[in-house]
DNA sequence: CGGATACATTGATGATTGTCAATACAACGC
DNA sequence: GCGTTGTATTGACAATCATCAATGTATCCG
């Protein structure tokens, strides 16, 4: 058989357009959404959000989350590394606040 | 030591507010975000979106995604089961379109 | 029917993830 | 310094996931 690619047997699809989507952007966004892909983390984010600009102390997050303290700490780390929250130490306690800019970034990616 | 709970040693945190967050809602949202937590799926979604209301044929998604056909089929299934896309069979081909309503639902959850 | 094409499903495998117990670290009060 | 309290890290384990090769199913064409 010849090596000619074929003959375009039938019209199949409308050209889908080369997606204005950078590989790197996709990976970066995926990391953000991955951080949101857990009910416990969504709950934590909600708690932190509703705590206002001042942020929330971890000590007030553990019990409502229904998870152990190390697990909560783990989830907060995931959120932090995804850029969705930032933490600050005040004395003995750690305070977390939402990084609204990053949240908006993800929201924007959805349209 | 007494069994009294303690004496509230120091004021720690402002009450975080009991998060207007249903457990079930969180699980449902998490599933949606989980579907977005992969660069390949984001890319696919972008391709489908930019194909307009008519949708996109799988045959035009495989090559741009840089993955094998079964892998693409798998990812489309994940997106479908998350309610983010819907599929329809037209003759030999399968067409996928974005379920904007579900996308907006997730967007809304981000504020 | 028979071959070809489009897509889905199955099975296997290596990687990542959520969870907790145990432990470490750090800051405070005494 | 010493014990206590708040938080983070480590280690282990079961579960889920992304991927591809192989196979199955369905539709079209001749």
Image (tube, coloured by chain):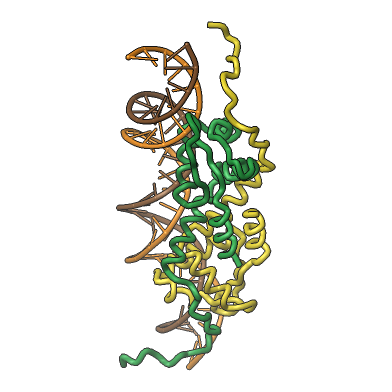
Chain colours: A green, B yellow, C brown, D orange
Res A47 visible = yes
For the N terminus of chain A, give its image quadrant. bottom left
**Number of numbered discs:** 0
Q: Residue at point 54% right, 47% down?
A: A38
In the rendered image, residue A42, in percent from the top left (x then y), is placed at 58, 46
Q: Nearer the viewer, residue A75 or B37?
A: A75
In the rendered image, residue A43, in percent from the top left (x then y), is placed at 60, 42
In the displayed structure, A63 sits above or below B28; it is above
In the displayed structure, C26 sits above or below A42; it is above
Q: Is residue C26 toward the left or the right of residue B73 in the image?
A: left
- Dividing the picture into quadrants, the one containing residue B7 is top right
Q: Residue at point 50% right, 32% down?
A: A93
Q: Is residue C15 toward the left or the right of residue B89 in the image?
A: left
For the C terminus of chain A, give its image quadrant. bottom right
Res A1 visible = no
In the rendered image, residue B28, in percent from the top left (x then y), is placed at 62, 50
In the rendered image, residue B51, in percent from the top left (x then y), is placed at 57, 78
In the displayed structure, A108 sits above or below B33; it is below
Q: Nearer the viewer, residue B26 or A98?
A: A98
Q: Is residue A5 toward the left or the right of residue B78 in the image?
A: left
Q: Nearer the viewer, residue A31 or D7?
A: D7
- Dividing the picture into quadrants, the one containing residue C3 is bottom left
Question: Residue furthest toward the top?
Answer: B1
Q: Residue at point 62% right, 60% down?
A: B83
């Amino acid at each position: 058989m010849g090596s000619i690619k074929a003959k375009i047997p039938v019209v199949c699809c409308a050209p889908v357009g080369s997606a204005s989507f950078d590989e790197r952007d996709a990976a970066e966004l995926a990391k953000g959404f991955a951080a949101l892909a857990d009910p416990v983390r969504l709950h934590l984010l909600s708690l932190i959000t509703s705590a206002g600009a001042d942020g929330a102390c971890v000590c007030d997050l553990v019990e409502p989350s229904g998870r152990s303290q190390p697990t909560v700490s783990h989830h907060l780390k995931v959120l932090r590394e995804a850029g969705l929250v930032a933490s600050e130490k005040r004395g003995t306690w750690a305070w977390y606040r939402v990084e609204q800019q990053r949240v908006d970034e993800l929201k924007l990616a959805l349209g």
